[in-house]
Image (cartoon, grey):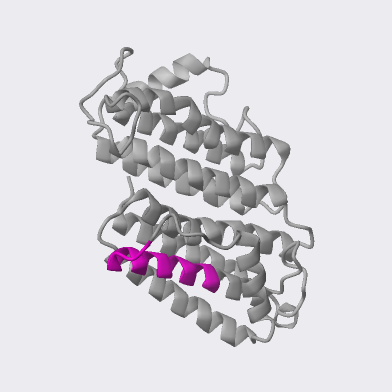
Amino acid sequence: MPDRARLLADEAVAAASFDAVVARIPDDRWTDPTVTPDGWTPTVLLAHMAGWLDECSEVLEAMRAGTWDPDAPTDPVDDINARQASRAAALTRADAEVLVAAARVRARTAWTAVPDLTPDAWSWFEESGPNHYAKHIHDLTAWLEGITSDPDVGRMLQDDAEGWVAFGALVDAIDPSVRDAEDWSVTDVCFHLAAWFGRGADCMEHDAGWGLPWETDAELPTEEVNAGFLARSREMTLDEARRALGDARDRLRTAFSALAHPSAGSKDVFKECTVDHYAEHEPMLRRLTGSGGSVP
């Protein structure tokens, strides 16, 4: 399901959103060690962003060269983060901004050049780019509002990214003409998730759980709502449904990461729309592959 141009556009939009939050940092607060629970300053946070974009670039460049070994041992993420923070301690704000700009160019170039858009390549660019910006937009938003960022948000965004890549691998393995015993196709599944992402985003934008007035047609039975979505998807191509799915997920993730302190209702909605919903439909998608549930 990864689309090279689409992910480049997602990265650009996410980077612009991150830059907009960074632009709100007062000049006299760039050395405040309170942005994250680890005690990072804004300067360290920017260097950390650059560090992971460079990590991503190294992997993608090795994939292109045919030298990447997915089974090679790697350092724990916490160790890498600590090493990046230590290196960034002596940097100035200008230094960090230069590092991020250069790392973005390198990562985008590497993503453009990687020959095969495998789930591993997609995961690295998705998680080091758009998803990583979203995590730290939340940290900075909370910090600027004078509160501690919610540790659940980063974990939930990470869980979504991992589930999203696995879901996409299943979608790619299915012939769009195939239907299951209940006459659902992969196009129907993609638009079904897109529609629920949209309803979830409505809730996120009100920092609320399911219900009126922000959830459209909340008074209708779920089966009736789903039937309406199914009727709409029957008029779509798979490409159209996938575009709708990507757009709706971007909106949901953006709305969630922008909440300085998301309510319990918002967290529930985000989880139900993402990892829970992927898991709910994975058995159907595996049956639609026609390969006994295995995905290449």
Q: Position of residue 109 (x, y in %)?
A: 33, 71
Say which quarter of the image contains residue 295. Answer: top left
Q: Is residue 64 visible?
A: yes
Q: Nearer the viewer, residue 120 or 275?
A: 120
Pick the front one: 199 or 238: 238
At horizontal 27% and vertical 32% (from top left) the residue drawn is 174
| Quadrant of image for the N terminus | top left
Q: Nearer the viewer, residue 3 or 79?
A: 79
Instruction: Look at the magenta stretch and give its main secondary structure.
Output: helix
In the rendered image, the vertical position of residue 35 relative to residue 168, given as above or below: below
Residue 135 position in % (x across, y down): 60, 57
Quarter of the image with the C terminus is top left
261, above or below 84, in the image = above
Residue 208 position within the rendered picture, expressed as x and y whole percent measured from the top left: 66, 37
> Which residue sits at x=55%, y=81%?
97
- Which residue ends up furthest to the top in the rendered image? 181
Q: Residue furthest left?
A: 177
* Relative to 46, residue 1 above or below: above
- Residue 23 appears in the rendering: no
Q: Is residue 284 above or below residue 66?
A: above
In-image side of 219 versus 290 (left or right): right
What's the magenta region? 50-68
Determine the residue positioned at 26% across, 40% down.
Answer: 239
The answer to whether 262 appears left or right of 272 in the picture is: right
Rendering coords of residue 60 (x, y %): 37, 65
Total count of labels: 0
- Residue 227 falls in image quadrant: top left
Task: Locate residue 137 relative to residue 182 in the image: left or right.
Answer: right
* Residue 57 is a magenta residue: yes
In the figure, residue 107 lies in which quadrant?
A: bottom left
Is residue 258 magenta-colored? no
Residue found at x 30% / y 57%: 4
